[in-house]
């Protein structure tokens, strides 16, 4: 008889048992398939060495088992699971010559039955007992073959027991090869007895080891307790060592004399304190702070203005004027390091590069850089720290920043100085003033540190969104530099030269993985962002980089994005061009406003209904805007006839002025002339030119007063497609400072009085 043979490693199938097997090796799979294709018969025989991956016929035991394949399932990982039933012992007579498969000739082997004697019966019984004892000793059983053993067939009993014992494969094979059942009974008896002995021994050892462990653990706890008790009693084991340690650290920290003395006193105190006391913890934390502050560490300045200019240019596109002023500032500091000059304050909307300019200045000077945000700080203690008597007290943000800086001359950026609040806990601005004041900041006192710290080597730079919100005493110390925002063209350039390359690098991409043309960047700027700075632009570019990264991982090559395909990556455009009115309308005029996020435009609407001479104001109007509206109303009233307004005004009509909720103007008077224009238009029925926008404060007599934020407003007007911009004459100098591109694209009408505003903004005749 010839059958395919499947070599087993470390397991054996005995006759009479059902066994699940996993099959993975190529040759074995072949055998399985061959067997399954035929009469489901296959030979299982064990390898002598389970670790042999490619056994030859000589590596396989000479006796195996003929089995029936009950079930064969292919698993998702390509291997097979088979359930087999052992039918019959067989001797392998020889192997047929087939390269990829063991095919073998076998002859069946029959058991030599044991004599039907009492001795056999006793043997059987004994094996059953031993086996139960074996199970009780707590060996896990393979499978569920716990005790479905029939005692009627001693041979099968032996096979089943042998299959379930944890014994070496050689011994199992021996059981398999022992055809004489009486001998087999003896053999299994011997094996079982030995296994039980082994298990008992193992158990004893285990118990002993555990006893030892428990003993040593107990000793450990006791020792720990003794330690704790000693500490409680003040009998520390090595307070001297700890104190020595601290002394060395204090010496190494380069403290100035006063601080050094104080630190040493604290170490001494610590030495005489119970080590685990709460107070000792406080002292340690304090010493930690003292020794980690950069009392005397200083970096060497690089005072090379050309290099500084190069670095500022490298990091930032445009901003020529700002960079010039920074360089002037640095030049003065280089010549006169002790000069007690003003502090630089970079003022502008978010994302215009204030923080990153600060970082560049640090790089240019070869100094360390730290930044702390003062936004929302309302408590003096946040600047100056809490006294050490408070549990969990810490130094203030300035000292924390210094520790982080690691040198005593960093560039220190104080972000959002306009966002500090003030309340009953003291004025943080006053504390900040001390930080910034060159006359006193060489002895800055933090409540926690309780020692003067020298801040005079620090180069402080502050930032703010709106200069008006900076507390006056602080503002007096500052030289403000304004960064109003970028034009579309500038944003595209910044994206191309800085944001895109940086994001590509940060996302682990190469330049070729993401292709964006200029036009695409323009579409991102226009369709997905509406801001003075470039923060959202950077975010959108990061989104594109993520898409490119996915593509790269998937092995799909470069991501090309064009203005046409961009919506596939970023979703539908969020902003569709500008939202100025397309046609001239009666009673609607466009005001320009600015807030901390930059400039923008809003429509102001006026409608007139028959009534009793009321002025109704709705929408988002603060007190100042209400007053401006009143002023505009009075002006229009006084010019009624000249403006061609009928006699029903003011007594027989109600005038309703509305500023849409969506607009979030800064509370200010600069919408005055716009409200007056919309009023005049609504009452005279003369339409307002759609391409005109304006900004200016109005007096009762129709004079136009200057306003702030013209640069931001002009940038917004340019972005929104305004063509004519009406501005107070007094603001003319601001126009000179605008980027040439904006200055040339806009037609500025400089006005002193309301009459000029109306003659520019209103169409000559009434609408029909
Ligand atoms: P701010 O501090 O004004 O809110 P950031 O300094 O955080 O703004 O700037 C936001 C991002 O825009 C940064 O990644 C910055 O490098 C970048 N950025 C802003 N302006 C420029 C510019 N002119 N050239 C290059 N990158 C710029």
Image (cartoon, helix red, strand yellow):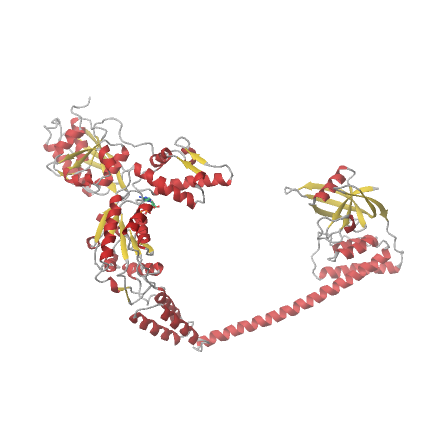
Lateral position of residue 163 relative to residue 453, left or right: right
- Picture quadrant of residue 75: top right
Q: Residue at x 26, y 29 (%)?
A: 581
- The residue positioned farthest toward the top in the image shown: 768
Residue 98, x across and y down, in percent:
77, 41
* Rendered location of residue 481, percent (x, y): 23, 48
* Quarter of the N terminus within the rendering: top right
Count of picture labels: 0
Q: Is residue 489 above or below residue 447?
A: above
Seen in the picture, residue 491 relative to 237 is either above or below; the reply is: above
Q: Quadrant of ligand 1?
A: top left
Determine which quarter of the picture holds residue 234.
bottom left
In this orientation, does residue 558 appear? yes
Q: Name the one closer to the observer, 219 or 117.
A: 219
Compare residues 275 and 261 and report the one nearer the observer. 261
Q: Return the residue nearer the eye: 125 or 245.
A: 245
Q: Quadrant of residue 444?
A: bottom left
Residue 574 at least partly seen? no
Identity of the residue drawn at 63% across and 41% down: 76
The quadrant in which the C terminus is found is top left
x and y percent of residue 103 in the render? 79, 42
Q: Is residue 186 above or below residue 753?
A: below
Position of residue 482 measured from the top left corner of the image (x, y, whole percent): 24, 46
């Amino acid at each position: 008889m010839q059958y395919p043979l499947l070599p087993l490693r470390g397991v054996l199938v005995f006759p009479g048992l059902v066994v699940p097997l996993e099959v993975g090796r190529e040759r074995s799979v072949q055998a399985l398939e061959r067997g399954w294709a035929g009469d489901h018969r296959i030979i299982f025989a064990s390898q002598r060495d389970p670790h042999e991956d490619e056994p030859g016929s000589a590596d396989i035991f000479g006796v195996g088992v003929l089995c029936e394949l009950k079930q064969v399932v292919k698993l998702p990982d390509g291997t097979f699971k088979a359930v087999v039933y052992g039918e019959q012992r067989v001797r392998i007579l020889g192997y047929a010559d087939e390269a990829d498969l063991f095919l073998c000739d076998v002859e069946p082997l029959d058991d030599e039955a044991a004599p039907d004697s009492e001795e056999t019966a006793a043997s059987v019984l004994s094996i059953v007992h031993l086996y139960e004892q074996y199970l009780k000793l707590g060996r896990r059983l393979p499978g569920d073959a716990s005790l479905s053993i029939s005692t009627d067939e001693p041979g099968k009993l032996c096979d089943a027991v042998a299959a379930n014992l944890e014994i070496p494969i050689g011994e199992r094979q021996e059981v398999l090869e022992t055809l004489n059942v009486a001998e087999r009974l003896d053999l299994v008896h011997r094996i079982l007895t030995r296994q039980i002995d082994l298990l008992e021994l193992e158990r004893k050892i285990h118990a002993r080891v555990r006893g030892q462990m428990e003993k040593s653990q107990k000793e450990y706890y006791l020792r720990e307790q003794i330690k704790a008790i000693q500490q409680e009693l003040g009998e520390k084991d090595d307070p001297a060592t700890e104190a020595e340690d601290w002394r060395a650290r204090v010496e190494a920290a380069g403290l100035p004399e006063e601080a050094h003395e104080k630190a040493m006193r604290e170490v001494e105190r610590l030495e005489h304190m119970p080590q685990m006391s709460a107070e000792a913890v406080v002292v340690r934390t304090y010493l930690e702070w003292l020794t980690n502050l950069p009392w005397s560490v200083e970096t060497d300045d690089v005072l090379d203005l050309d290099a500084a200019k190069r670095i500022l240019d490298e990091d930032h596109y445009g901003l020529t004027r700002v960079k010039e002023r920074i360089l002037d500032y640095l030049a003065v500091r280089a010549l006169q390091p002790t000069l007690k000059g003003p502090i630089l304050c970079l003022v502008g909307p978010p994302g215009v590069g204030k923080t990153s300019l600060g970082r560049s200045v640090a790089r240019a000077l070869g100094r360390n850089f730290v930044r702390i945000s003062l936004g929302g700080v309302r408590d003096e203690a946040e600047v100056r720290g809490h006294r050490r008597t408070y549990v969990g007290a810490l130094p203030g943000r300035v000292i924390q920043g210094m520790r982080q800086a690691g040198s005593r001359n960093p560039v220190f950026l104080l972000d959002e100085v306009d966002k500090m609040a003030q309340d009953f806990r003291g004025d943080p601005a006053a504390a900040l003033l001390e930080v910034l004041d060159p006359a006193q900041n060489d002895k800055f006192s933090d409540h926690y540190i309780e020692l003067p710290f020298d801040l005079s080597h620090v180069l402080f730079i502050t930032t703010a969104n709106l200069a008006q919100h900076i507390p006056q005493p602080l503002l007096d110390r500052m030289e403000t530099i304004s960064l109003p925002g970028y034009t579309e063209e500038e944003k595209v350039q910044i994206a191309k030269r800085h944001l895109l390359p940086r994001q590509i690098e940060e996302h682990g991409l190469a330049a070729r993985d993401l292709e964006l043309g200029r036009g695409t960047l323009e579409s991102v700027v226009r369709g997905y962002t509406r801001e003075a700075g470039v923060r959202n632009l950077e975010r959108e570019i990061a989104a594109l980089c993520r898409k490119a990264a996915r593509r790269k991982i998937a092995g799909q090559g470069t991501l090309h994005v064009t203005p046409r395909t961009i919506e596939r990556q970023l979703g539908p455009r969020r902003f569709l061009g500008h939202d100025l009115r397309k046609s001239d309308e009666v009673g609607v005029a466009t005001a320009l406003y600015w807030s901390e996020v930059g400039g923008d435009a809003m429509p102001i609407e006026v409608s007139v209904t028959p009534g009793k001479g009321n002025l109704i104001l709705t929408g988002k109007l603060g007190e100042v805007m209400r007053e401006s509206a009143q002023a505009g109303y009075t002006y229009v009233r006084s010019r009624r006839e000249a403006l061609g307004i009928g006699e029903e005004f003011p007594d027989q009509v109600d005038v309703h002025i509305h500023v849409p909720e969506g607009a979030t103007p800064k509370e200010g008077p600069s919408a005055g002339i716009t409200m007056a224009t919309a009023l005049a238009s609504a009452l005279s029925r003369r339409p307002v030119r759609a391409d005109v926008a304006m900004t200016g404060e109005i007096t009762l007599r129709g004079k136009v007063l200057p306003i702030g934020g013209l640069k931001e407003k002009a940038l917004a007007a340019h972005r929104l497609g305004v063509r004519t911009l009406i501005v107070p004459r007094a603001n003319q100098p601001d126009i000179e400072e605008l980027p040439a591109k904006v200055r040339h694209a806009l037609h500025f009408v400089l006005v002193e009085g309301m009459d000029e505003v109306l003659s520019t903004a209103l169409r000559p005749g009434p609408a029909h």
